Amino acid sequence: MNKGRFIAGAVCPQCKEVDKLKMHKEEGEDIRECVRCGYRDVQRFDQQKTEPTTRVNKSRSEREAEEQPVQIKFIP
C-alpha cells in the first residue's frame, strides 16, 4: 500500500465505510483507495481548469445586469 492522505468524511463506494479512503499519486495519476476493502479508482482533477461561474464570483455589475424586475398584473 502506498503512502497517502486520508479524505475526511469520504464514503467508500464499495464497502460504504466512512473515513477509510485515502489519496496518493501513482505514475502521475491521483489514486483513491479504500484501506478497508481495497477499492481503487483514478480521480481526474484536471478536467475543469477554470472556476465555474457562480453568483459568488461574479462582479456586482454582472449580478445587477442579470436582475429582472418582477411585474405584477392586477386583474379585477
Image (cartoon, rainbow, N blue to C red):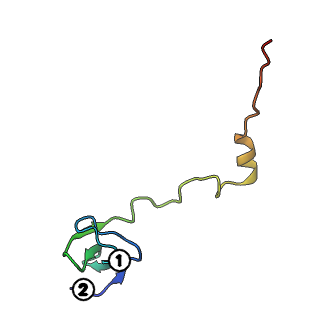
Residue 20 is situated, as x and y percent measured from the top left of the image, at: 30, 78
Residue 11 is situated, as x and y percent measured from the top left of the image, at: 33, 69
Question: Which residue was labeled with disc 2?
Answer: 2
**Left or right relative to 45: residue 57:** right
Question: Which residue was labeled with disc 1?
Answer: 19
Q: Amino acid at mark 2?
A: Asn
Secondary element under disc 1, as helix, strand or loop, is loop
**Left or right relative to 71: residue 32:** left
**Left or right relative to 66: residue 11:** left
| Vertical placement of residue 6 versus 76, above or below | below
| Near-viewer residue (63 or 18) | 18
Q: Nearer the viewer, mark 2 or mark 1?
A: 1
Residue 5 is situated, as x and y percent measured from the top left of the image, at: 36, 83
Mark 2 surroundings: few (<14), some (14-19) or many (≥20) residues within 10 A: few
| Near-viewer residue (45 or 20) | 20
Q: Amino acid at mark 1?
A: Asp
| Near-viewer residue (36 or 7) | 36
| Near-viewer residue (54 or 19) | 19
- Farthest top residue? 76
Give the residue drawn at x 70%, y 41%.
Answer: 66
Mark 1 surroundings: few (<14), some (14-19) or many (≥20) residues within 10 A: some
- Farthest bottom residue? 3
Give the residue drawn at x 26%, y 75%.
Answer: 33
The mark nearer the N terminus, 2 or 1, is 2
* CA gap, disc 2 and disc 1: 17 Å
**Left or right relative to 38: residue 61:** right
Secondary element under disc 2, as helix, strand or loop, is loop
Q: Quadrant of residue 4?
A: bottom left
Give the residue drawn at x 34%, y 73%.
Answer: 18
Q: Quadrant of the N terminus?
A: bottom left
Which of the numbered marks, if any, corresponds to residue 69? none
Q: Quadrant of residue 75?
A: top right
